[in-house]
Every structure is written in C-alpha cells, then in structure tokens.
Image (tube, helix red, strand yellow):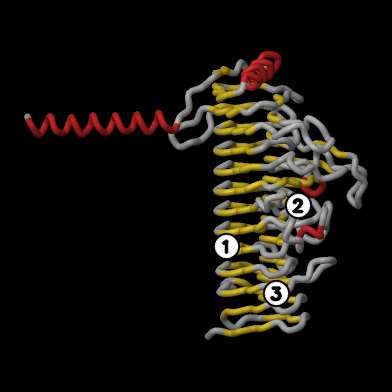
Amino acid sequence: MKRYVAVLSIIGLFLSCTHLASTLSTPSFDSIVTGQSDSAQDVKAVQEAIDKGGTVLLKGNFDFGPKGRVTIKNDVAVWGESDSNGRPLTRILGGFWVFHSPLPSTDLPLPGPGPKIKIKHIHFDGVTWSPMHFPFTSGAEITGNKITNVQPFKLPIKWKGGDFVLVQTGIILGTRFAHKEKFLPGAVTGKLLVENNEIDLKCENPKITMGHGVFFPWTWGATIEVKGNTIKNVSRNSIESLDNYLDGDGRGSVTITENEIITPSDGCPFPSPITYPSGIVVGWFFDKSGATDPKKNSKITITKNNIQANGALSSGIISLSDGTIIQENQIELNNGPKTKGITQFGSNGNISNNKIMGTGAWAIGTLSWKSFKGSGNLLERNDFSGFTASNADFYCTGNKNTLIGPESKVVDKGEDNKILVKK
C-alpha cells in the first residue's frame, strides 16, 4: 500500500509540474477570435482584436479574400493554435500583406517607436506578395509559422526580362518597399527574431519572380536573428539581409544560424544575373559604403546552416560586408560547373570549418568588385574533400588573404595572399 501511495504521489507531482510548465509557456489571451471562413467577417474581427492590443488567439480557418489586410499600430502578440509538435493548426487563406505595420510618416524624426509585434503558430496559405510586411516596428518575433502558396505580385520595372517583375516574399522586415526613396533611421529596430518557421515559395514563373524567403532591407540598430527555419523553392535568395545600419549607440547585429535551405533549379536574374537562386546573401547593396564604415556596419555571423543549391548559377553564401563570420556551414552544390559555395566580397572576414560538396566554379572565393576589396580574410579548416572544382577550391582576386588547410586547388590573381598547407 505504501508503495502504491508513493507511486500516486510521484504521478501527481509530475502532472502538477507539467500543468505548471504548460501554464508558464502559454499566455492568457486578451481576445479570442474564431475564423468563420468568410472574408467579410474574418478581416473585421481580427482587425478589431488587434486594435485592442495585448495577446490575441486566432482559432480555426480565416478567409481574407484576395486583398484582406490587418493593420498593426499597437503592441500585439497574435497566436494561432498548434498541435503537440508545434505545427500550426490555425490557417489564414488569401490576403495581401495580411499583417502590416505601416509607416506613420516618411518625415524625420518619426513620431515615436513602432509597435512590438509577435506572430506565432499560423499557417498562411495563398497570400499575395507576403503574409507579413513590417516597415515600422521596435521589435518583432515571428516563430513557428508556416507559409505556402504565396502569390507573386506584379511590379512595373523595366529590365532585360521585360516590363515588369513579379515579387514574392515570406517575411519582410525593413522599409525598402514602404519608402524606397531613402533610408529612415528608427523605423525598424529592436530585436527581430525569425525562428522555426516553414517557408515554401514554389511558384509558376521563377524566371521572372524575385523571391525572398526572409528579407531584411533597411533596419537601424536592430538585433536580427534568423534561426532554425526551413526555407525552400525561393527563386532569388532564401535569406537576404541588406543595409542594416548600426544606430547612434553602435547597436546592431545579424545572426543567421541553423537554417535548412533548399533552392529550386530555376530562378530570377533580377537585379543581378550573376548568381541565382541562392541561399544566404548579406551585407550592403544600396549604400555600399556601409560595408567598410564602422559607424554603419552591423556585425554579421552565419553559422551551422545546411544549404542545397540547385540552380546552374546558384551560390550557397554571399557576403558583401567587411568582418563577416562564416563558420560551420554545410553547402551542397548540385547543378554543375558555374555554381559557387561561399563568396566573400568584403574584407577582414573569418571563413572557417565549412564543408562544401558537389561541383562548382569554386568552393570559396574572396573577390574584389566595385568598392569591395575581398582582402585580409582568414580561411581556415574548411573541408573541400567532397568538392570537384571546375575552376578552383579557393579562387582569389583580393589581396592579403590567408588560406590554412590541406592541399587544395588554388587560383590566386591577387597579391600577398598566403597559402599555408597543413598535411
């Protein structure tokens, strides 16, 4: 009997602790909205709940029609329901920028900080352009969501491919599409976390669709972390982080880690025909001076990502910034002699313990291009053993780079580069 009572006591304690842990991890909700699968009702009901702020639970299926959108102006956390494995059960069908935090002004200074936003456990299905577009926020956490069947949106841009380009994005955090005329300090800042989301941007016309899985164009003093996401079928760049400025106190960083990326075989050559579709692209594009300016340049770290690059011109990782740390990534190049593993256009970076497999032009390259010098980088303990080079294991046009590792095929077109072979 004593043993029986003891067992019951242990079970009771376990259940009590489990209940406590569940209570601590699940918030209380200020509003609960149940989807009616009716766009006339669903958009209005979600907007009213979000206007109240606090924590909102969305249950069931919501229909946002072709253009339904919810505007976020106050701090809010929006949760969907999920199963025991964390997979989202709540579904939003359709919409155009389903969750959007618009700029209150394009004049500086801005009237105050943007809203703090959390979006969790929602399946966005069939949205146009992007389900989440946040050009005004002082902090965002986007976790555990699923994004499928994103419909491309036509932008009238003349290029070699025609008079328009289609755009398609999983998540946008930045002001580039809201105010492309100039950068707005303070508009997108704070902690920006994108974690454990599943993004599939398969589309009908990848050759004219500029796709981005997760896109950070123009932030200020932001602590950006992209972690543990699964991203596939993106026709341009699966993760792209461009022109993310330090703020006046020197705050700002970009960390991209533990993501699983699979590119499609076809992609879009806009705005550049050199590399696409690619895995991770970081650095400076609109204001190239930021790459070398210590008052602008946020520290960038790219670690432990698995990338399968399947396009004929695909690249695994591209850095357009000084001081980039690229470590412990695994890159598989699957489509022939013009693909590229890691390319560093910036200087003074650390590229170490990466594994590059497959066939391509180079496993790692340090290149000078325009204002980028591709110099002074350290490359150490990278694994080229599963790579077949059409050009080189290490291709270099920059200067004063150091390669340390086993004997490999090197093409050195720079000056004062050191090749240190370890047997």
Residue pointed to by mark 2: 243
Alpha carbon distance from label 3 to label 1: 23 Å
Camera-near label (3 vs 1) is 3
Q: Amino acid at mark 2?
A: Asp
Tag 2 and tag 1, C-beta contact below 8 Å: no
Q: Quadrant of residue 33?
A: top right
In front here: 370 or 76? 76
Q: Mark 1: few, some, or many residues within 10 Å (few <14, many ≥20)?
A: many
Q: Secondary structure at mark 2?
A: strand
Can you see residue 71?
yes
Separation of residues labelled 2 and 3 (CA atoms)? 22 Å
Question: Helix, strand, or loop for circle 3?
Answer: loop
Left or right: 157 in relation to 4:
right
Q: Closer to the N terminus: mark 2 or mark 3? A: 2
Please report whichever mark, 2 or 1, sits nearer to the chain's N-terminal start: 2
CA separation, marks 2 and 1? 25 Å
Q: Circle 3 is placed at which residue position?
A: 376
Side of 77 where 64 appears, left or right: right
Q: Position of residue 142 (x, y in %)?
A: 60, 38
Position in image of residue 228 (x %, y %):
55, 48
**Could you tell me the amino acid type at mark 3?**
Gly
Residue 330 is tagged as: 1
Name the side, left or right, on which 246 lies relative to 49: right
- In terms of depth relative to the viewer, which is nearer, 325 or 306? 325
Residue 130 appears in view: no
Q: Quadrant of the N terminus?
A: top left
| Mark 1 residue element | strand
In the image, residue 95 above or below residue 44: below
Asked where in the image residue 192 lies, by quadrant, the reply is top right
